[in-house]
Amino acid sequence: MNLLNCLILAFLLFGIGVWGLMRRRHLIGMLISIELMLNAANINFISFAYFTAHDATAGALFSIFVIAVTACEMAIALAIIVTMYRRHKSLDADQLRDLHD
Amino acid sequence: METILFNAIWVIPLLTVLVCAPISATHSKILKSLHAASATVVLIAVCFLTYRVYALSGTPVDKAADPLMLRFFTDIPWLDVFKAHYTVGADGLNMLLLALTAFIVWAGVLVSWNIKGNQKVFFALIQLLATSVYGVYMSFDLVLFFVFYEMEALCMYLMIACYGSGRRDYGGKKLTLTLAFGSSMILATLFGIYFEGGISSWSIVELSKVTLPMDFQMWAFPLMFMGFAVSSSLFPFHFWSPDGHSAAPTAVSMLAAGVMMKMGAYGCLRVAMFLMPEAAKIWLPYVVALLIFNVVLGPFIAIRHKDLKYITAYSSISHLGLIFLGLAALTPIGLRGASLQMISHGFLTGLFFATIGMIYERTHTRDITEMGGIMRKMPFLGVGFVIAGFAGLGLPGFSGFIAESTIFIGAFQQDSTLTRIVTILAILSITTTAVYILQTANRMLHGPLPQKYESLTDGCFREKLVIVVLVACLLFIGVCPGWISEILDQSIAPIFAKIAASSIPVVGG
Amino acid sequence: MSQYIPNFIIPDALLLLFPFIVIGSRLFCDYKSKIPWRIANFGFIAIFILLNLIPLASGEGRFFISNWRVDDFGVLMREVLMVSAILGMWLSKDYFEHGADGKPQMHQIAEFIGAIAFATFGGFTVVSACDLLTFFLGLEIATIPMYALTAWNKQDQMGSEAATKYILMGSVATAFELFGFSYLYGFAGSLHFNEIQHAITNGTSPLLWLSVLFLFCGIGFKLTLFPFYTWAPDVYEGAPTPVTAVLSVTSKATAIAFLVVLVYGPLAPIQQQIAPLIALLAGVTLFVGNLGALKQSRLRRFMAYSSIAQAGYIMVALLGPATMGKTAIVYYLFVYAVSNYLAFFIFGIIGHHREETFASLRGLSKQNPSLAIALAISMFSLAGIPPLAGFFGKFHLFFSGASTGHYVLVAFAVLNNVLALFYYLQLIKSAWVDEPDGHLTPLRLTKRQRGVVILLSIAVVVIGFMPFLSDNIFAGFNL
Amino acid sequence: MINDVTLGYLILLLPLFTFVVNGLFLGNKCAKAAAALAVVCNGLAAASAILLATDYFCSDYAPQKAILFEYVFIPFAGELIAKIGMLIDPLSTMMLVVVTFISFMVNIYSIGYMREDRAAGRFFSLLSLFSFSMLGLVVATNLFQMFIFWELVGVSSYLLIGFWYHKPSAVSASKQAFILTRFADSFFLLGIVLVSYVVGSFDFSTINDLSLSAFKATSVNLGICSMSAADALILGSVLIFTGGWGKSAMFPMHIWLPNAMEGPTPVSSIIHSATMVVAGVYLVARLFPFMAACGNTLTLIMWVGAFTMVFAAVIACTQKDIKRILAYSTLSQLGYMMFALGACKMGQVVAVTGWTASTFHIFTHAFFKCSLFLIAGSLIHQVHTNDLDAMGGLRKKMPLTYICTLISILAISGIPPFSGFFSKDEIILAAFQGHHYAVFGLALLTSGLTTFYMFRLFFLAFHGEPRHEGVRAGHVHEDFAMTLPIVILAVPALLSGLLGKGIFEKFFTPGKLHVPQLLKLAHAEWIPYTAVGVAILALLIAWFLYASPKAKIARALDETNRSGLYKVIYHKFYFDEMYYTVVRQFIFGGVARVSRFIQDYIVEGILAFVIWFVHKLGDLVRTAQAGYLPFYLGTLIVGVLIWRFFGQLPL
């Protein structure tokens, strides 16, 4: 197991996230895909920290921060989605067509 | 002292606007008289300064103002970020153009005395426009020049769209956007000039001492020249002027055709040709080809039109084509002729639009086929129009003839094929000009008087005054052109010297 | 740890404390009381004054705990952000008051202002960061409150939809950024800017370029660059007007600050290589923004497109050398903030009585000429017509862009001004030329609104050709 | 004793003064004062002109040139300076006298003629404007000044033809006159520019001193072609003559002159017979050495003149509008003068008889033709129509007029000892001496025709039974103010030949010529007799047809049942129609329409297309904003790819 594998793994994860984002119409599902993408970045950080970087702590630290930040971001996202659910009574991304040119 | 007065030329209009700002729009009488007063003051000041420039000719100027022999030279650092200075000065050429502007502004204020709509805003806009035009002619720093040059876009649209007639929004937009298009072309090249010039200065005087790299000139000159030419309605960028003029209220047409359209030609001469003479020598002989439309076809188009303002607009297009013919001749006579034409056409077209506006106020139509015989009812305005027409077709005794003959003779000195052809065509097309002008005058003023015009009245004192003053200017230049040429020559000499100095020969089309 | 008291940190500290104070004050006073509002005003203005008291230091700036840097660019950007925050607060005030129909359009002013303060602090963090982590945190702090603000009106379903779109796309953009950061970290082996810069000077690698790509794409979202701008029109239209205003200034300022720090900081050695990318982004963005704005009928959507185009113009400055670029951007942000807020104030005044469309501007010049003039001023300023401030701002940008010989881009941008002028004229036309259909509901201006509009109009007219602002900024960078 | 310079100033400035004062101040308010001022000033001008002439001719200085004064008008480069000056030589002095004297007469006449007109003030001021500009033209020292006043003359003619601007016919006639002459003038201007470019000066003295041999070497680029400077000068001379061609209404640019008769009769008499229309002849005479030097220009001039002479005379025989008859006779007389100038050239040598004759004819023709027009005017004033149908039998009513008419008509027919005889005889002689026998024949024929139509007019107007109830009722009388000038003018019409001959043969030579002059000329004694014989014959025919007891006036007067040829001639060979067709269909309908099409459809069309295109692009951008979230997310992904591939990053 070396750096390249990890990077490829991260990239695959990222790709899956993107793919899910494109495929899913359910907002929660989309959020999950986004989580995947963010965590792919985390894997990057960790692996770089583990293999190459000369201050290894920084990478780990970063990933932890990322997790925290993402958590609160998701919290707000869910809150917003909930308010929207109150109005729309659906979580289908295709329903969001009121705002357009 | 005179320097302060000179700088006051563009400040006074602004001050007037500020002074008028607190006055409520209901006191339109006070506002109007204030504006008229300030316009008159500026007019007097400019005339005095013009005389001073004439009197001072030959006396040495301070070093900074060489080689342009600028009087009242002022140079103050302005925006340090890009070394922009506040640089103004006067030589014969721009002084005369300032005088022209002052006259036209003065006339414009008087003409639009009882214009419909919010008069306070309208007169404020006129003053702003005046400021911008004065500034353009005075400034010798490219940034300052451009700031003033672009300012007009701010006034024109509002004036045309809010106070105009006919397709005013369309006309206003067309005019404003086309002019903006031109000035954006200019702006793009200005940066180039600054950075290629390599002396980190925007001053025309300074930049004229360096030679810009040739490959830069080759693309920058046409861009800049066309940019300026847009506002002088050189083919193919002339399309804005007929619609714009026809939509605009009288005063705006006067200012636009009389003064603003000269800014472009002035810029071509003062900035484009003066700073990039080598490229000018290479490009201009080809630019001349465009004039075939302006000078030869323009009058023919005017023949086919029925709307007075369209006719006048196309006549302006053809007359301005002559300016470019003079410029493109690249001979001292040609350049002088071009400058003369700028001034002469300013007064001429001012008179044209003024009379048209007055007539339109009374007849409520500009369609010449509907009019007829109104010479009987309003002899004064009629005579004014006829005089404008004669001046327009280059009748000796009026300024038009002086300018045109100078241009013809000057352009004929230029021995390049295209220039020759165009010159010959231009000389032969004085007939066409006569055709549309006489046709217009006859249809409108002569013949039997329709029943509906029985109640028309002749011009009131204010209008008569405007007409008389403008006609006097036309006659003055026409009868004693000697000294005006003298003034112009001093200011054209350095420009031509710069052009002549460049080694490149004029390629013959 | 510096010996003397680090007074330059005071504003930041205050701003960090400040939202808690405001929100906390709600606990001790009743629903209708004005106290939080007063505190907010006092605090923001105090912070702004304190910022102005900080002397501009050259070069590296001063450090607080080794990686909180306060350099002159930072200070100036702080000022921009504070201006935006203050104006946004004033603009929003009217929406919390009881309108004609008795009940206010929005609730919980204290929290609202707190959120704005947080967003502003995020901007502060971005400009004072000197490692990737702080940088990232700053960006997030600046963004997350915006999501909340967008959805402030729980009743308004447009708002929630906008917020949903915003946050979903925003998170994706964050993911891109993180990816970029991670690669950058992997390339340099450290988070610290100096070391990254050092690593880059030693040599580049595909990893670096990949990270650059991801970083630009990520920030391209916040800066609404092509093709990442798609959220902007919808969000701008969906969000409440004051939020839109704050969004269009604060978050843009933060994003461009991010880019400036990045391009003139760690990426400085490869500025020449990424110049084509920047140029392309700039050119395409401003073109597309102008095109989109051509045929709009709703004011906020229109402003969205115009701000997209403005972002494109700002990008042009990034091509220049550091001093010029920073001067240009800071100055332009000032000008842009002032003109934009002027426009939004007027739209707000209109919006209190009619819906915010071009049609509802009709007859403004007859009904309230001074307001119409103010509108014309702001529009002409945004269109970049001299002698208004907008022109000089753009002039700075183009100057900076042209100084490294990007004449073609500058020419293209300048020609786009014509397009821009067209749609700004459209708006002016509906305010000045078009006749109102039917009876006009009278416009009611509060003292604050009138005062602010006058103030901003004067500012827009004056700060252009009066050299003090630009010269001070310039001097700051040239000490 | 006033010196000549002051006289010169007086001659020029008095009419100008009248124009300004009448135009600005007196105007229509007090027409009487205007008239008085005009008469007095023009009288003074005439007096000073005559004084000047006597001074000049009596002094032994004559016939050299003298420049009384000269000012710089526009300084072009170097030698190329436009000046305004006053040149005195026999030719210009003669013209000065003619112009001032006739304008004096016409002013007096106009008092009577304009008595009822409201706008008399304007009339008088314009009349003075005309005489001022005509004088300026006459005394021009250089081509540029000539052109300036040339244009002024043209415009005052325009204003005066269209004086009754409520009459559509008058308005259109004035327009036609101005534009046609303007058309010619554009070539004149081009010629001036060309010649001045080659020669480097406008001055007549310089241009007349040229010898083409000096210009063989250099070449001039005229755009379409490039030619040697000498050829350029020849071209220039033709172009300059074109100006005269139009102004003197030579064929085919003649049509404006008959139509110009719509104007008030005094105007026709001064502008369109006596002075302005001879400007073309004057121009050629002034530049004679130059023209003579320039290849075959003179031959061209001769043929143009000769053709016009016959052509106009033929038409004149059929017309019934007396003013038109006179107009055509003017045309034909101008043709005489023109071809006389041209006829001087024979191969490489030049005889000067023609020149003298032509200038002499200018002189004599001015008087009798002017008086004839004045007479026609007073007839019309009495009978209120131009038509010969309505006249006849006026001999009894207007005896003085009758006698003066007879004198003038005999003069124009070249019956000795009346003035016309001498000048016309000289011209015919010149044609003969030049060995241009064809032209010589034409000239003889034309003199016959002239006599015929003039007497036709005479008999139909004065003899026979009155065909007008006004005449029968005897309202007709002679107006003093109108008859006085007629009578006065009859004197020079009678005598100027006798007096003039001496002076002209003594002083009038075109000056130094650059082509070998023919010294010994064959003098044919028989020519006068032939000419007079022809004239008498024609007179008899006219008498037989229109005045003899068994002449059928009615039949002579109706043009309906006539041969086709007569109809064609009666309709002036349909030249007006052709002219209108060309102008309407070709100029207005063709070129103008095409250029407007280019403007309205091509230029505007391209503009519209650009705008449409930009708007389409805008729609494209806006259709992307469908509010469709997955699409938006897609843009994020696609964006990364776009900048990956187009971002020009070294990936």
Image: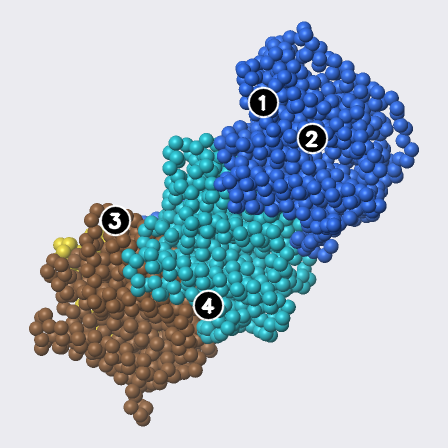
**Mark 4 to mark 2: distance in Å?**
66 Å
Marks 4 and 3: in contact by CB < 8 Å?
no
Q: Amino acid at mark 1?
A: His
Chain with colour yellow in the figure: A
Select label 1 or label 3 by which is in front.
Answer: 1
Chain with colour cyan in the figure: B
**Mark carried by residue B8:** 4
Left or right of C291 in this view: A79: left
Same chain for the residues at labels 4 and 2, yes or no? no
User: Toward the viewer: B397 or D252?
Assistant: B397
Residue C196 in the image: state x and y as whole percent. Answer: 40, 78
Chain with colour brown in the figure: C
Which residue extends farthest left? C30
Q: Amino acid at mark 4?
A: Ala
Determine which quarter of the picture holds residue C334.
bottom left
Same chain for the residues at labels 2 and 3, yes or no? no
> Which residue does the numbered mark 1 point to in the structure image?
D477
